[in-house]
Image (cartoon, coloured by chain):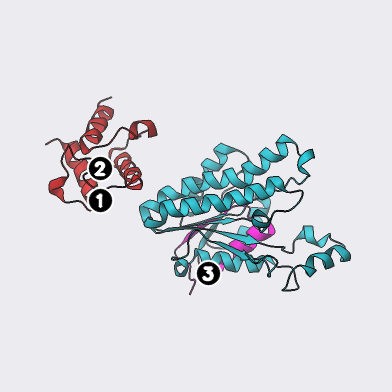
Amino acid sequence: MFELTGKTALVTGATGGLGAEIARALHKQGAKVVLSGTRENVLADLAAELGDNAFIAAANLSDSASVDGLVAKAEEAAGSGLDILIANAGITRDGLLMRMKDEDWDTVIKVNLEAYFRLARAATKGMMKRRSGRIIGITSVVGVTGNPGQTNYAASKAGMIGFSKALAQEVGSRGITVNCIAPGFIASPMTEELNDAQRATILQRIPAGALGNGADIAAAAVYLASNEAGYVTGHTLHVNGGMAMI
Amino acid sequence: MSEVLERVRKIVIDHLDADPDKVTEKASFIDDLEADSLDIVELVMAFEEEFDIEIPDDSAEHILTVGDAVNYIQDKLAA
């Protein structure tokens, strides 16, 4: 089950904790993985860790031309057509709406939502020809529940969900599925900075009683990328320990 | 019958799984050959590949019949 041998996957934001975990998990299931991000030395370290079947295609997701060329670059690096797109890269520029600068809005929408559109558009072409493909957007629970201070981020993540549903309907007849994964609170360098009181407040809201980790999200990605998930499309899989049951 | 027409017909027949008798120059992809909008996008992509040309979206919009495709491709190849 969930075998990915012979598949080629592109993971954006592979320099981040979550992206790296997803790349490791896909690779473990046998997929060739192309790692993308902005920090090339971090990508090189991860590629070295994974060994065979790991490739690098650096890109800056706030640069449209760089995003438009990324799928072709990844296919060239791997020497095969792209079967699995994991749009994982994302940024935050938090702040209350009344103090939010245009730039904070624009950058978040561009990197989180517009890059997803550009990558999916480029990936769909080859996937349609091959009559199979997996497009997976890493969104957030915040895209569904909202969160104060994150109007831009929540809008971008909700946008990814709507985009995925529309695209799922367009390409469903061609063997391509389009789904999202919505992580809740995931342990990261950021959550390590929380003090005990903050941590307790957050945990109170999570029935599972713990923060999630990258492996929880990576497992969901492996499933949605697999042949076994072929009948699941337009879905958002919430991986949040029960924090929001939606 | 022109060579371009034959190659276009082959792509259309293969892609739409259409009855070869129906794939005439006058045949409309949508009305006669039951193509949907996604099929048209795929056909245009297939034409681009077969003839090694680029068909911009605003031109693709005007390719409604097999004959339209043949004419467009012939003009493009002659240019």
Quarter of the rendering containing residue A60? top right
Task: Give the mark nearest the N terminus, 2 or 1.
Answer: 1
The chain that appears cyan in the image is A
Circle 2 sits on which residue? B29
What number of labels is visible?
A: 3
Query: Do the CB atoms of the residues marked 2 and 1 lie less than 8 Å apart?
Result: yes
Q: Which residue is mark 3?
A: A29
Is residue B31 something one can see in this rendering? yes
Q: Position of residue A96 (x, y in %)?
A: 78, 44
Secondary structure at numbered mark 3? loop
Residue mark closest to the camera, 2 vs 1 = 2
For the residues beneath circles 2 and 1, the answer to whether they share a chain is yes
In front of the other: A166 or B53? A166
Chain letter corresponding to the colour red: B
Which residues, given as a range, are shown in magenta?
Answer: A1-28
Q: Nearer the viewer, mark 2 or mark 3?
A: 2
Q: Which element carries disc 2, helix, strand or loop?
A: loop
Rendering coords of residue A216 (x, y %): 64, 69
**Residue position for label 1:** B16
Residue A102 horizontal/vertical position (percent): 71, 35
Q: Which label number is shown at residue A96? A: none
